[in-house]
Image (cartoon, grey):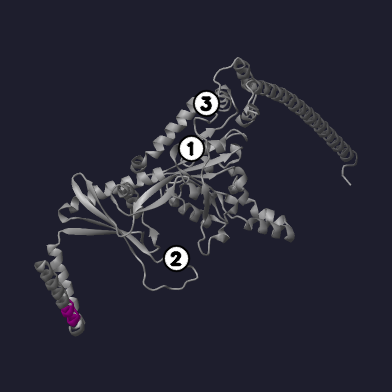
């Protein structure tokens, strides 16, 4: 006990002496000499200290963008933190159904990879003075510190950090909550916490298994999507931006929007629903593109209705002539209408495959339209819309998918009659699905739904027959009228020629009799 007491007494005296000497040093030594001593003492300690420290800040760059490395490290350490850290933080993800744990601040954990041991620590700096601001934001600076032995420098800066970033991004992809984005009007982009895109959680249940389409066609699309999602090195090799365009076209109700949802769920991508009518000009369109994330599908639905982008190059030639013919009031109204959106075909083409389209990667651009023939060929050519997918009327293969989804049946005696009717009648999958929708829990409801579908198909077939007959009748009447008009014009032309000949004959007779025409 005496020896322990003496030890603590000596330690206290030593510490007091050190503190006294340090105070004297700070007070009486010139600042330049202090800096000199500190600098060289630090170099001396570095020679003796065998460990290297690497700092990963949360925000980097002039615009203080959140570091992808910080996020990847945070995800990578989440699993190890839950197993080894004593103090943890919890975050809710994936529809509020699961937790992700990460180590708390000033906590340190050990990681080992291929026999090399490293230490990770989470830190934060909180400013000592508070500043007033109209746009308050946290000045807290968060960062991770990686510590490792200097003999492992080459292995850590190469293999280990690549492993951490790759694993962290994979964990983030599994844990992230996918979102459906919609673009905000340009006038709301400025101000505190303003954003170009607003979002909700993407919860559409559509999959390729529930999509009413021919099985071979679905497999072809799925293989194309898989090849694209794994094609980073291939696209870099051929010198193209890592993106792909899909054109979905067909009558309303054929499942174009459902196809987009199935693609997003299949690839685990976010969806950006771009409303062109709210985009003021090409510059805003470009800014919206820059703000989209990787692993996303950018959708422009009903592009033939979004803006008047069809045949703009031909219309431009007639612009001056049309404006000259317009009165001042109509001209002013036209100018006000054009102020709503000045997005041009050229701007949209640059958006799809111009230089700015290479900002980011792993993006799919989808156009949908009911009338593909109305679109400018330059907009949908290969290289911009790489794959054209026709969403057609419901045929028997698609019907079997719907019957399985809605009625949970794969075979029924009425299937033969339905197959024949579907080959003869154009009915959209949406209309077929409506007839298959169960109205009650009755055991006989399945057969009732199939009979209702048969009646609907027969009605549609009869309506199509009557429509075809009416169109044929109208066409025949039109042709008859055109024929009568042509005959009338021909008779008038012949009459005019006879009158001209008669006049010429009369004039010649007068010349012959008088010798001169008066």
In the image, which residues are magenta?
Answer: 19-25
Say which residue label 1 marks.
Answer: 263
Horizontal arrangement in the rendering, residue 479 relative to residue 106 (left or right): right
Horizontal arrangement in the rendering, residue 399 relative to residue 480 (left or right): left
What separation in Å lies between label 2 and label 1 (alpha carbons)?
A: 38 Å
Do tag 3 and tag 2 residues touch (Cβ < 8 Å)? no
**Crowding near pointer 1: few (<14 within 10 Å), some, many (20+)?**
many
Question: Foreground mark, 2 or 1?
Answer: 2
Say which residue label 3 marks.
Answer: 214
Q: Residue 112: x and y, percent?
A: 22, 47
Give above or below for 430 relative to 79: above
Helix, strand or loop for disc 2: loop
**Crowding near pointer 2: few (<14 within 10 Å), some, many (20+)?**
few
What separation in Å lies between label 1 and label 3 (alpha carbons)?
A: 16 Å
**In which quarter of the view is residue 487 placed?**
top right
Q: Is residue 20 magenta?
A: yes
Q: Main secondary structure of the magenta part?
A: helix
Q: Return the disc, 3 or 2, that comes first in the chain's sequence.
A: 2
Q: Residue 127: x and y, percent?
A: 37, 70
| Most foreground residue, 117 or 268 | 117
Say which residue label 2 marks.
Answer: 137
Q: For the N terminus, which image quadrant? A: bottom left
């Amino acid at each position: 006990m005496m020896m322990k007491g003496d030890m603590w007494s000596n330690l206290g005296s030593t510490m007091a002496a050190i503190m006294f000497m340090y105070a004297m040093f700070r007070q009486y030594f010139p600042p330049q000499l202090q800096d000199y001593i500190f600098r060289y003492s630090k170099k001396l300690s570095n020679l003796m200290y065998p460990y290297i420290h690497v700092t990963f800040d949360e925000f980097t760059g002039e615009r203080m963008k959140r570091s992808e490395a910080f996020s990847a490290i945070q995800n990578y350490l989440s699993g190890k933190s839950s197993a080894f850290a004593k103090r943890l933080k919890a975050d809710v993800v994936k529809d509020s159904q699961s937790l992700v744990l990460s180590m708390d601040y000033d906590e340190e954990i050990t990681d080992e990879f291929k026999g090399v041991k490293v230490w990770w620590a989470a830190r934060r700096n909180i400013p000592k003075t508070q500043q007033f601001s109209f746009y308050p934001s946290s000045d807290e600076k968060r960062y991770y510190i990686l510590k490792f032995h200097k003999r492992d420098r080459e292995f850590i800066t190469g293999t280990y950090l690549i492993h951490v970033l790759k694993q962290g991004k994979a964990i983030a992809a599994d844990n992230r909550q996918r979102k459906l984005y919609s673009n905000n009007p340009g006038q709301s982009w400025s101000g505190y916490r303003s954003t170009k895109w607003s979002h909700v959680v993407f919860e559409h249940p559509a999959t390729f298994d529930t999509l009413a389409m021919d099985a071979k066609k679905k497999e072809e699309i799925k293989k194309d999507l898989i090849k694209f999602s794994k094609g980073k090195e291939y696209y870099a090799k051929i010198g193209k931006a890592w993106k792909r365009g899909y054109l979905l076209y067909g009558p309303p109700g054929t499942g174009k929007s459902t196809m987009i949802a199935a693609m997003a769920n299949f690839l685990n991508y976010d969806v950006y629903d771009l409303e062109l009518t709210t985009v003021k000009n090409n510059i805003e369109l470009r800014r919206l593109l820059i703000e989209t994330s990787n692993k996303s599908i950018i959708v422009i639905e009903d592009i033939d209705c979004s803006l008047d982008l069809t045949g703009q190059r031909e219309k431009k030639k007639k612009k001056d002539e049309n404006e000259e013919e317009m009165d001042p009031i109509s001209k002013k109204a036209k100018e006000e209408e054009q102020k709503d959106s000045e997005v041009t075909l050229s701007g949209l083409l640059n958006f799809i495959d111009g230089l700015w389209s290479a900002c980011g990667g792993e993006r799919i651009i989808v156009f949908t339209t009911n009338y593909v023939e109305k679109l400018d060929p330059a907009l949908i050519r290969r290289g911009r819309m790489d794959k054209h997918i026709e969403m057609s009327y419901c045929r028997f293969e698609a019907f079997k998918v719907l019957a399985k989804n809605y009625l949970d049946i794969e075979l029924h005696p009425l299937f033969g009659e339905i197959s024949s009717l579907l080959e003869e009648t154009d009915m959209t999958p949406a209309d077929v699905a409506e007839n298959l929708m169960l109205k009650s829990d009755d055991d006989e409801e399945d057969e009732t739904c199939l009979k209702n579908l048969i009646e609907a198909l027969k009605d549609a077939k009869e309506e199509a027959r009557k429509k075809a007959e009416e169109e044929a009748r109208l066409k025949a009447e039109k042709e008859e009228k055109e024929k009568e008009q042509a005959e009338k014009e021909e008779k008038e032309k012949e009459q005019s020629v006879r009158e001209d000949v008669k006049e010429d004959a009369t004039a010649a007779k007068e010349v012959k009799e008088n010798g001169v025409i008066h």
